[in-house]
Amino acid sequence: MRLTTQDVGWNRSSKPIIEGITLDVQPGETLGLIGPNGSGKSTLLRLMAGLLRRPRGQVFLDGQPTETLSRREMAQRIAFVEQLAETSEALTVRDVVELGRTPWLSALSPFGPQDEAIVNEVLDAVGMAQMIDHSWDTLSGGERQRVHIARALAQRPQLLLLDEPTNHLDIHYQLSLLRLVSTLDVTVVMALHDLNQAMTCDRLAVMDNGRLIICGAPADVLTPERLASVFRVRATPLHDPTDNSTILRFHSIEDELI
């Protein structure tokens, strides 16, 4: 699915939060949103998901304005995992993930064996199959995050929006999640804080003070000058011989001034 934003902006209490965001995300691409805290990444994701109304500009899915789509049609196309998503504690893991099938169900097409197979498949993909009957209130923050990601995958979306998906996960599940995302046949937009993780994306969009600064390949975007001006750090590129990748080791600019 192709996602396009055209001159998108949004205010809170007359204060601009994001302004003039124009992006074109190609089908099957993984785009990383990066930037300091408060740069507008979460707001932009919510606008893409149709959760914030009346933005300036327009959002298109495969060329169709999102305001012409019903909530059900949006939910069949887009899955969004928020940074601090919550769910009623009265539910089990199975219940939460089954909610992801809701956009596809109707009186004529109730929850059936195919839906159950999808639920089992996505729970296995995020490493939570063994906890399918556990109560929500017994889960850790990282486990809850993996269940929410499973719920999103159960929607069978064409566009997956993730807001800091690795935040509450230990390193093993961070790597597992990013590897899983890389194998999905969907378009992905995800906000990330870890710039080394962000380097695995196809392209990076850098935001600062509510504006899009640049969008391009990770190597072209994460230049020394931009790291210093936007993120206030300097970085030493290191070579990892195991896979010939580049890893950044960061240094505080303030430390250099001492």
Image (tube, rainbow, N blue to C red):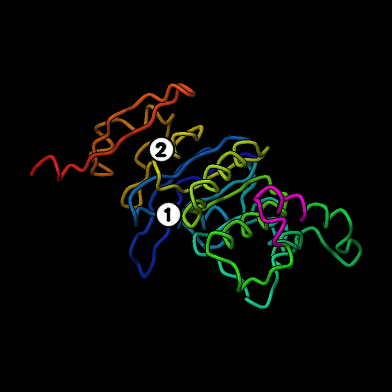
Circle 2 crowding by C-alpha within 10 Å: few under 14, some 14–19, many from 20: some
Q: Which residue is mark 2?
A: 196
Q: Is residue 9 left or right of residue 86?
A: left
Query: Is 129 inside the magenta-drawn segment?
Result: yes
Q: Quadrant of residue 177?
A: top right
Task: Answer with left or right where residue 216 lies relative to residue 93.
Answer: left
Q: In the drawing, what numbered circle is on residue 64?
A: none
Q: Is residue 175 above or below residue 18?
A: above
State the image coordinates of residue 126 (x, y, percent, origin top left): 65, 50
Q: Quadrant of the C terminus?
A: top left
From the viewer's perspective, is 192 left or right of 178?
left
Q: Is residue 92 above or below residue 66?
A: below
Q: Which residue in the structure is indicated by mark 1?
A: 9
Residue lying furthest left: 258
Residue 112 location, x and y as percent?
89, 60
| SS state under label 1 | strand
Q: Depth check: 70 or 86 in front? A: 86
Magenta residues span: 119-131
* Front disc: 2 or 1: 2
Extreme residue toward the bottom, this view: 90
Disc 2 element? helix
Quick one: 123 or 68, which is closer to the camera? 123
Quarter of the rendering containing residue 138: bottom right
Q: Amino acid at mark 1?
A: Gly
Q: Residue drawn at (14%, 44%), measured in percent from left and top?
A: 255
Inspect the image, locate mark 2, and give the three-letter code of the amino acid beneath it.
Asn
